[in-house]
């Protein structure tokens, strides 16, 4: 009997473990049937043991079938299982990489579309139509959509590139509108002031240039200085300094 004993330290592969299960089933079935044959009292014990012995066989066979089919790779030796596991990991990494590439493509496409739409919204209504308030609401809605798609703050700001060019020109134009009436029809000065903005190139003079011009011609006042501060703030931070007044 000593040679027939199960020696756990000699089980070195999953398939050997399955063989041990079959051996254990034979021993268990024999024990149940033998006990059912010997036990007479109480009378219900013997039938219960016989039923248990019968139920164990199909149950075990179903479990063994599942193990040999669905979990077959796990029953292979270490070398084969390691190779199978590496292949599965490679497939999973490839699937994750594909998902990342697809997500990045969708984000790039969304960013391009939003960039164009914001540019169109900013350019629309230069002489009427959509007001500034509605434009800001639209921009905020686009920003929220991009956040839901996983965009970071810097990526969202990048989509404002064209929109901000229009806003930059608006800031410069607001300063020029304040300056022109103070020049009292002086043609050379009017021409110089008009040159501070160029809509075709989205060019706007720097805040220091505006200040120098206003100081040199003694036309600086609180309104002009506020508008120049607005421009300086927008250039540095990319946001409105006085949104309530700007959007009024």
Image (spheres, rainbow, N blue to C red):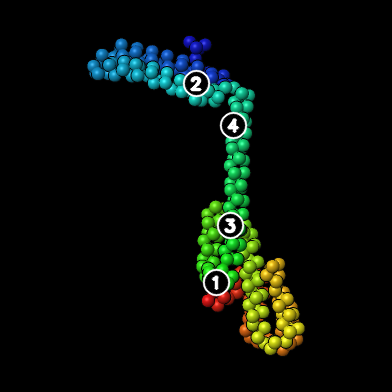
- Pick whichever of labels 3 and 4 is earlier in the sequence: 4
Q: Write the residue at 57% across / 19% down.
A: 10
Element type at mark 2: helix
Q: Which residue is mark 3?
A: 114
Q: Of tags 1 and 3, which is closer to the observer?
A: 1
Q: Of tags 4 and 2, which is closer to the observer?
A: 4
Decide: few, some or many residues near mark 1? Use Cα within 10 Å; few <14, some 14-19, many ≥20.
few
Q: Which residue is mark 2?
A: 68
- CA–CA distance between discs 2 and 1? 75 Å
Residue 33 location, quadrant: top left
Residue 143 location, quadrant: bottom right
Decide: few, some or many residues near mark 2? Use Cα within 10 Å; few <14, some 14-19, many ≥20.
some
- CA–CA distance between discs 1 and 4? 61 Å
Rendered location of residue 128, percent (x, y):
55, 71
**Do the CB atoms of the residues marked 3 and 2 lie less than 8 Å apart?**
no
Q: Is residue 64 left or right of residue 181?
A: left
- Pick whichever of labels 4 and 2 is earlier in the sequence: 2
- Pick whichever of labels 1 and 4 is earlier in the sequence: 4
- Pick whichever of labels 2 and 1 is earlier in the sequence: 2
Q: Which residue is mark 4?
A: 88
**Do the CB atoms of the residues marked 3 and 4 lie less than 8 Å apart?**
no
- Pick whichever of labels 3 and 2 is earlier in the sequence: 2
- Pick whichever of labels 1 and 3 is earlier in the sequence: 3
Rendered location of residue 139, percent (x, y):
55, 63
Q: Is residue 59 left or right of residue 117?
A: left
Q: Which residue is mark 1?
A: 128
């Amino acid at each position: 009997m000593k040679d027939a004993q199960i020696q756990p330290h000699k089980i070195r592969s999953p398939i050997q473990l399955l063989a041990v299960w079959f051996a254990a089933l034979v021993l268990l079935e024999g024990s149940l049937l033998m006990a059912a044959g010997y036990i007479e009292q109480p009378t219900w014990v013997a039938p219960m043991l016989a039923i248990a012995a019968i139920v164990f066989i199909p149950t075990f066979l179903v479990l063994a079938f599942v193990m040999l089919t669905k979990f077959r790779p796990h029953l292979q030796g270490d070398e084969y299982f390691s190779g199978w596991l590496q292949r599965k990991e490679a497939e999973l990494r490839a699937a994750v990489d594909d998902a990342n590439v697809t997500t990045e493509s969708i984000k790039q496409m969304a960013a391009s579309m939003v960039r164009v739409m914001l540019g169109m919204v900013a350019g629309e209504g230069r002489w009427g139509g959509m007001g500034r308030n509605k434009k800001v609401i639209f921009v905020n809605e686009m920003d929220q959509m991009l956040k839901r798609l996983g965009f970071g703050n810097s990526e969202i700001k990048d989509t404002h590139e064209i929109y901000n060019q229009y806003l930059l020109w608006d800031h410069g134009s607001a300063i020029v509108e304040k300056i022109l009436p103070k020049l009292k029809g002086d043609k050379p000065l009017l021409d110089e002031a008009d040159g501070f903005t160029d809509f075709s190139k989205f060019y706007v003079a720097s805040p220091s240039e505006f200040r120098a011009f206003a100081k040199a011609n003694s036309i600086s006042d609180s309104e002009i200085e506020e508008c120049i501060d607005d421009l300086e703030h927008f250039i540095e931070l990319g946001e409105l300094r006085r949104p309530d007044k700007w959007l009024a």
